[in-house]
Image (tube, grey):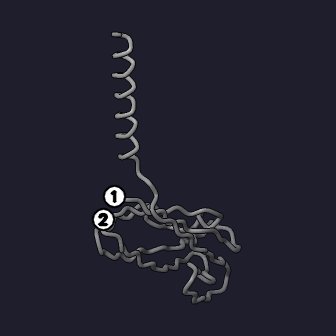
Amino acid sequence: MIKFSYIIFFMSLFLLLTSIFFSFTEKEIQSEVLYASVNITNKAGFEINGTALTFGNIQRPGTSSRNVILTNDYNFPVIIFIKVEGDISKVLDFPEEIKLGIGEKERVSFSVIASPNVDYGFYSGEVLFNTFRD
């Protein structure tokens, strides 16, 4: 009878710790992907696109910036992790984490930095925005 009580106790403890662990584990609530591109060349030019993060043509050395406005429409604070995939990640500067309170908006700047030693060429990829409850 004592062994059975120990088994019940340890199973209950295990279930309690498991539920506490999963309640504190961050769960992604939203994910967005934005295409990004730049052409590093010897001629300057620009491109306007409302659905992508395009920087057009930039000369080296040179920079170009674009802004994205992030808004928290949830009724709780959020944290947004930003990650860039693709070869544009070699030349793109951006914040990796943004915290927003309820109803807050923030303008986030993305800058292409074409240093003198960057190769000419077309760079592209995706910017991933992963939102979690803070």
Residue 79 lies, with reference to residue 17, above or below; the image says below
- Position above or below: 43 against 16: below
Kindly report which numbered mark, 2 or 1, lies closer to the viewer in this rendering. Answer: 2
Q: Secondary structure at mark 1?
A: loop
From the viewer's perspective, is 62 left or right of 42? left
The quarter of the picture where residue 55 lies is: bottom right
Counting other residues with Cα less than 10 Å from the Cα at mark 1, is it few (<14), some (14-19), or many (20 or more)?
few
**Quadrant that contains the N terminus:** top left
| Amino acid bearing label 1 | Asp
Depth check: give the residue in front, 89 or 51: 51
Q: Amino acid at mark 2?
A: Phe
**Residue 120: x %, y % from top left:** 69, 73
Question: Looking at the image, which is closer to me, 99 or 20?
Answer: 20
The image shows residue 9 at horizontal and vertical percentages of 33, 22
Check whether the beta carbons of the residues at disc 2 and disc 1 lie within 8 A of each other: yes
Residue occupying the point 38% across, 15% down:
4
The answer to whether 113 appears left or right of 19 in the picture is right
- Residue that badge 1 annotates: 134
- How many angstroms separate mark 2 from mark 1 (CA)? 8 Å
Look at 30% across and 75% down and name the residue there. Answer: 103
Quarter of the image containing the C terminus? bottom left
Count of numbered circles on the image = 2
Give SS at disc 2: loop
Q: Which mark is residue 76?
A: 2
Q: Is residue 67 above or below residue 116?
A: below
Residue beneath the point at 41% across and 61% down: 97
**Would you say 72 lies left or right of 29 here?**
left
In terms of image quadrants, where is residue 54? bottom right
Front position in the image: 52 or 55: 52
Q: Earlier in the sequence, mark 2 or mark 1?
A: 2
